[in-house]
Image (tube, rainbow, N blue to C red):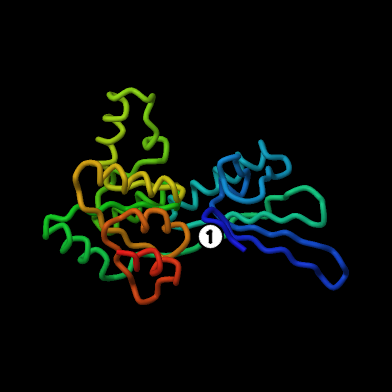
């Protein structure tokens, strides 16, 4: 089974031991939060593991690797952080030209990704999207005042993209742009993108995309 934040599986081995394994964004795998979906946990030795894993995750991002954190639990024992899986996933050869063509048609392009901030900035640089890539903190207005919300909306409007975001963050970006009077198109490949895909006026499907992405866009 999976949620929009991580995928998990429960397995019973031949010796009778029961295992719970999850993979996803490193910070989510280290510790889930009350607003997250599904089972809640905090890995054993969280303070130490969070520091080591966060540092390693950041370094891998600088080196161009996307990452997945892995957590395991045996029987009813502690949740243990098993490690980080580095994934080399460079942009397609035609992506840079595609971005240029879209911008040439006076259509703004933004990247919204769950990848580490460092890898988001590096990928944006490679495809010449722009390097003003923000973190989820910039999507939170300092207060409920009209002025602070306006400041947040201006960031969304002018930033080149956002990294380390969760599904509802993507939904918020689409909503803010729509409130500015813009028609928003969205492309994505799975459950992480479902809320934003359902919110956008235009869905852009690729032949290899997962069923959930296509279903979200079929309503338009």
Above or below, comparing residue 20 to residue 50 in the picture: below
Looking at the image, which residue is at 19% across and 52% down? 108
Other residues around mark 1 within 10 Å, as few (<14) / some (14–19) / many (≥20): some
The percent position of residue 4, horizontal first and vertical second, equals 52, 55
Q: Is residue 165 left or right of residue 16?
A: left
> In the rendered view of the protein, which quadrant contains the C terminus?
bottom left
Q: Is residue 181 left or right of residue 204?
A: left
Quadrant of residue 3 within the rendered picture: bottom right
Residue positioned most to the left: 105
Give the residue at mark 1: 86
Q: Is residue 77 left or right of residue 180?
A: right
Above or below, comparing residue 8 to residue 29 in the picture: below
The percent position of residue 113, horizontal first and vertical second, equals 40, 53
The percent position of residue 18, horizontal first and vertical second, equals 81, 62
Residue positioned most to the right: 15
Residue positioned most to the front: 219
Pick the front one: 25 or 209: 209
Looking at the image, which residue is at 66% across and 45% down? 40
Q: Is residue 14 left or right of residue 90?
A: right
> In the rendered view of the protein, which quadrant contains the N terminus?
bottom right
Report the label total: 1
Looking at the image, which residue is at 50% across and 63% down? 87
- Under circle 1, the secondary element is strand
The percent position of residue 104, horizontal first and vertical second, equals 11, 59
Quadrant of residue 134 within the rendered picture: top left
Pick the front one: 163 or 49: 163
């Amino acid at each position: 089974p999976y949620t929009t934040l991580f995928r998990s599986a429960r397995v019973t081995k031949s010796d009778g031991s029961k295992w719970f394994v999850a993979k996803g964004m490193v910070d989510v795998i280290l510790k889930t939060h009350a607003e997250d979906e599904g089972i809640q946990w905090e890995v054993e030795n969280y303070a130490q593991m969070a520091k080591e894993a966060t540092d390693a995750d950041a370094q891998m991002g600088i080196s161009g690797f996307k990452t997945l954190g892995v957590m395991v639990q045996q029987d009813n024992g502690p949740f243990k952080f098993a490690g980080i899986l580095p994934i080399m996933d460079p942009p397609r050869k035609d992506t840079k030209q595609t971005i240029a063509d879209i911008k040439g048609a006076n259509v703004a392009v933004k990247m919204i990704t769950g990848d580490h901030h460092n890898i988001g900035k590096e990928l944006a640089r490679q495809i010449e999207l722009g390097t003003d890539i923000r973190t989820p903190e910039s999507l939170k207005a300092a207060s409920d005042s009209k002025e602070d919300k306006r400041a947040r909306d201006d960031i969304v409007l002018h930033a080149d993209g956002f990294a380390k975001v969760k599904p509802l963050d993507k939904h918020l970006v689409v909503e803010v742009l729509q409130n500015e009077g813009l028609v928003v198109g969205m492309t994505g490949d799975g459950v992480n993108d479902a809320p934003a895909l359902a919110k956008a006026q235009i869905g852009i499907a690729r032949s290899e995309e997962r069923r959930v992405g296509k279903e979200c866009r079929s309503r338009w």
